[in-house]
Image (tube, rainbow, N blue to C red):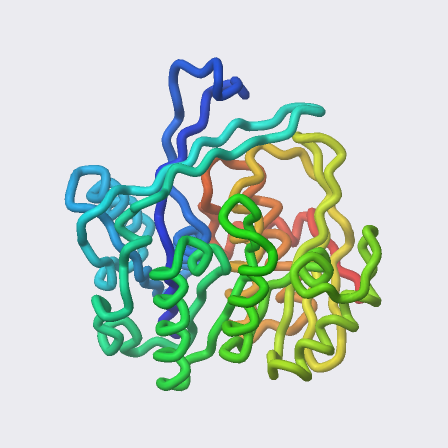
Amino acid sequence: MSRIVTCGEVMMRYTPPEHQRLKEASSFHISIGGAEANVAVNLANLGHEVSLLTALPHHNLGENVRRFLRGHGVGVEAVVHREGRLGTYYMEEGFGLRNADVIYDRSFSSFSRLSGGEVDWNQVFEGCTLFHVSGITPALGEVSRELTLIALSEAKKRGILVSFDMNYRSKLWGVEEAAATYKEILPFVDRCFIGYKDFTLLFGMEGTSLFSEATLKSHYERFKDMYGIGEFACTNRVVQSANQHTLQGFFYRDGTMHKTAPVTMNVLDRVGGGDAFAAGVLHGLENGFHERKIVEFGLATSVLKHTVRGDHAPFSEEEVLRCLESGGVDVRR
């Protein structure tokens, strides 16, 4: 099986118990996550050889993260230890009509100071066939933006496929800055996770406020022509309440859109749901699944993630397939 490398910041997440509000919390549940780290852990759980390029501080919290990654089968040979701190974020879980809220505390983290010159790219990409990064990494500052572009260039020089998840976060940067950076990144990309709202918000492309599959397909075809991207995927989420969502998966390749039926589910923890979908789709692509199975496997991985607390999806391929066989996720073309 191929070796996959992801690149991004790992953070500690602090969540008050029992859906408490942050301003009233007196204790927190701690978990570890980050978009690219979640994808790495998810892919390792699905049976892949995966390594994470990141930076951690020289203290026991950094060691905690290192042990977490190794415990989930993620290679840490590309982890750089340097000065700085471990990024954190605080998650107030929503309930009913009360929405969730996130507060980031990640300035001056070890990863945000990691430059491309500190990385041994030959070691990082040795034997690698797929590189995955998200739009969160370049949003962390100019140093991380340059690191992302260098990593993409180094991957392409070695003939490595590139997977990119747009993952726009308005709390990290503005629309204009994000769009300008994404336009630099997209020419490197072979597989792109980008949703309907991204096209209208970030690139000013035509679209209504309501989701349109036909418009999404048109946007995918336009980006395919503009950037040479071969495969696209996304989910469309409809939120009934903080604890009940409807999710549908889409996958585009060779002029055809493949989609799942909408799945309405109870939500225990939605954080990492998009990363689980990305990992599931990448798993299907790496294993040569047909298009229908790729998108249904991706959605099933995401649906299962919503049933557990934490940022990652602790499910094997067998468990995801069992979910599909039970009829929990159906697919329409």
Quarter that holds the C terminus: bottom right
Between residue 176 and residue 151, name the one nearer to us. 176
Residue ID at (23%, 38%)? 61
Residue ID at (50%, 59%)? 135
On the image, the x and y values in percent for residue 292 come to 69, 68
On the image, the x and y values in percent for residue 299 come to 64, 54
On the image, the x and y values in percent for residue 258 come to 74, 68
On the image, the x and y values in percent for residue 126 come to 27, 77
Between residue 308 and residue 213, name the one nearer to us. 213
Between residue 30 and residue 282, name the one nearer to us. 30
Residue ID at (70%, 82%)? 254
The image shows residue 105, relative to residue 149, as above or below, that is: above
**In the drawing, does residue 87 fall left or right of residue 162?**
left
Image quarter of residue 128: bottom left
Count numbered badges in the picture.
0
Quarter that holds the N terminus: bottom left
Residue ID at (61%, 79%)? 230
**In the drawing, does residue 166 fall left or right of residue 39?**
right
The image shows residue 159, relative to residue 136, as above or below, that is: below
**In the drawing, does residue 315 fall left or right of residue 289?**
left
The image shows residue 324, relative to residue 62, as above or below, that is: below
**In the drawing, does residue 101 fall left or right of residue 209?**
left
